[in-house]
Amino acid sequence: MLVTGFPAGTFQTNCWLVATAPGSEALVVDPGQDALAGFGPEARAAFGGLELQEPDDVRELADGQRVELAGLRLHVDHTPGHTPGHVTFRSAAEGGQPPQLLAGDLVFAGSIGRTDLPGGSTPEMLASLASRFLTLEDDTVVLPGHGPTTTVGRERATNPFLAGLDPVGGSRA
């Protein structure tokens, strides 16, 4: 899997571009404001040229749903807290690469998403972190909505917002 990202817009939201191979269809995740300006020569070269278009199919995603988009297989997890409808997308380990989590504003390197905006909920955020994040394998690469990439293991060991949270359930596939 090819992954590249860049901060876009006023809020510096990480916009992720994910594809199976150079020149193949790609997903754009969390484009934020002014993201199209970020698709400069580096992104175009890494992905074999880009043609951007609006999606032709927009659907509501169910918790636990598996979706296949642009040749990528992703698992959808509802992770409310930052917003009521927040979701994360995870890929399984494949071809020697560790699993990856497109985390949005669930968790960041050393922090977690805000819950003080309308619709946010601290109890729901903590439940999402315990049941959906802390149950993942330590080598899972976290692609957050803001800031640098990290891993589940690094955050489990060092993120002060996760201290004292007990994972709910077992390891997730």
Image (cartoon, helix red, strand yellow):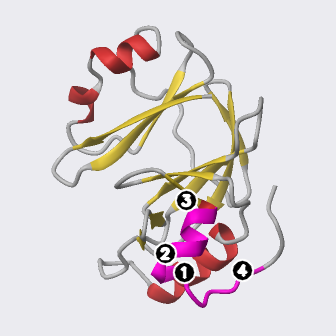
Task: Establish if 145 lies above or below 35.
Answer: below
Q: Judge whether residue 119 is colored magenta.
A: no
Tell me whether the residue at label 2 lies in contact with that at label 1, contact meaning CB atoms closer than 8 angstroms: yes
Mark 2, residues whose alpha carbon is within 10 Å: few (<14), some, or many (≥20)? some
> Which is more N-terminal, label 4 or label 2?
2
Secondary structure type for disc 4: loop
Q: Quadrant of residue 91?
A: top right
The residue identified by callout 3 is 87
x then y, percent, for residue 167: 72, 80
Q: Is residue 167 magenta?
A: yes
User: Is disc 2 placed on a helix, strand or loop?
Assistant: loop
Label 1 near label 4: C-beta < 8 Å?
Answer: no
Magenta range is 153-168
Q: Which residue is mark 4?
A: 167
Q: Nearer the viewer, residue 97 or 167?
A: 97
Mark nearer the viewer, 1 or 3:
1
Q: CA distance from mark 3 to mark 4?
A: 18 Å
